[in-house]
Amino acid sequence: MHVTRRRFMLGTAGAFISAAQARAAWPVQAMLSPDKDGPGWAPNAALLRQLPRLLELASVPGLGLGVVEGPRVWTRGFGRAVEDPAQPASDDTVFEAASLGKPIFAYAVLRLVDAKVLDLDKALYHYLPIPEASSARMSRVTVRQVLSHMTGLPNWRQLAGPLEPAEEPGKKFSYSGEAYFYLQRVVEAVTGKPFSRVMQEQVFEPFEMKQSSYVWLPSQIIVNEGDEVTLEFVGINGSAHPTTIEAFGKTFTVTRGGAHRVTFVADKVGIFGITCGTHKPSMSGELIVMPRR
């Protein structure tokens, strides 16, 4: 019997899957200063020799490092991409970039503004009048204020309830994933497309970012009938992700910072949905079970 393992990361517009995020551990001058072992625009030999130790000291299992200088590109992976089974990080390893996805999303929103699909100074409520955003303050929050983190909203609500800015919108900086998620829903409403499709069209396809995505990768899992399947779901953003694996009796909730592993035998043939009830259609995938021959 074949065993299939996959990891899924659950989040929102901030949950970008592309490149590594690591704490600064080396001066920029040391990274790019020329030496006899390489060109001045690329990381020098001293840094490359020290990186494995620096990763160990910082408790960073793996790193993808890239330098772009005009037409010249230098890339390399360091450490591990997967611990069990052991798999080294490479040039092509896909990392969770979490809230580094927000400025990428902001760029896509500005493209929609240029195309006259959105107006920076119109309220989100104008485009998508949801009940939880109907208060006097919240109904005035604009696209511009979301992008500049000036909504007055907290990062995430601790309890279910209305969206209510603690400050007058536009008056004070207040980092908010909650506001970005509302804007994500607005983008889906005005384009009539799933958020992941919008990002593909506005950013990833024009820039040929073929391995970057805001949805589960892979969005399809193909197994054979009778295989034992193990899936691990990790909450990287948002408050809670009620998740269902269709037809296999698997329903569970993953909280932010938490993980949930499910194991089952794929004893039914067909195409079955894997969905996060809060964030579908952005967070959805398919389990395809092929008949065993």
Image (spheres, rainbow, N blue to C red):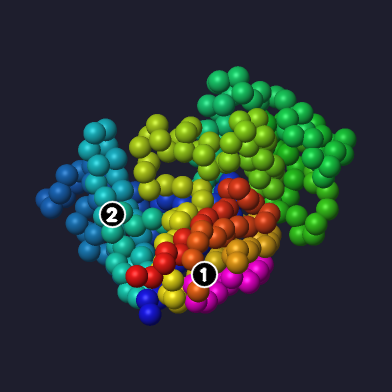
When the figure is inspected, residue 227 is found, relative to residue 39, above or below; the finding is below
Residue at the image point whose x is 42% and y is 50% from the top: 18
Residue 128 is tagged as none
What is the crowding at mark 2: few (fewer than 14 residues within 10 Å), some, or many (at least 20)? some
Residue at the image point whose x is 61% and y is 31% from the top: 191
Residue 267 vs residue 95: left or right? right
Question: What is the x, y in percent for residue 44?
Answer: 22, 52
Question: What is the x, y in percent for residue 246?
Answer: 60, 63
Label 1 to label 2: alpha-carbon separation: 37 Å
How many numbered discs, if any? 2
Classified by dominant secondary structure, the portion drawn in magenta counts as strand
Q: Quadrant of the N terminus?
A: bottom left
Q: Amino acid at mark 2?
A: Asp
Residue at the image point whose x is 42% and y is 47% from the top: 212
Q: Give the residues drawn in magenta, as a range.
A: 248-266
Q: Amino acid at mark 1?
A: Lys
Residue 264 magenta:
yes
Q: Which residue is mark 2?
A: 91
Q: Earlier in the sequence, mark 1 or mark 2?
A: 2
Can the viewer see residue 56?
no
Q: Secondary structure at mark 2?
A: loop
When the figure is inspected, residue 163 is found, relative to residue 231, above or below; the finding is above
Residue at the image point whose x is 11% and y is 50% from the top: 36
Tell which of 112 and 21 is nearer to you: 112
Residue 268 is tagged as 1
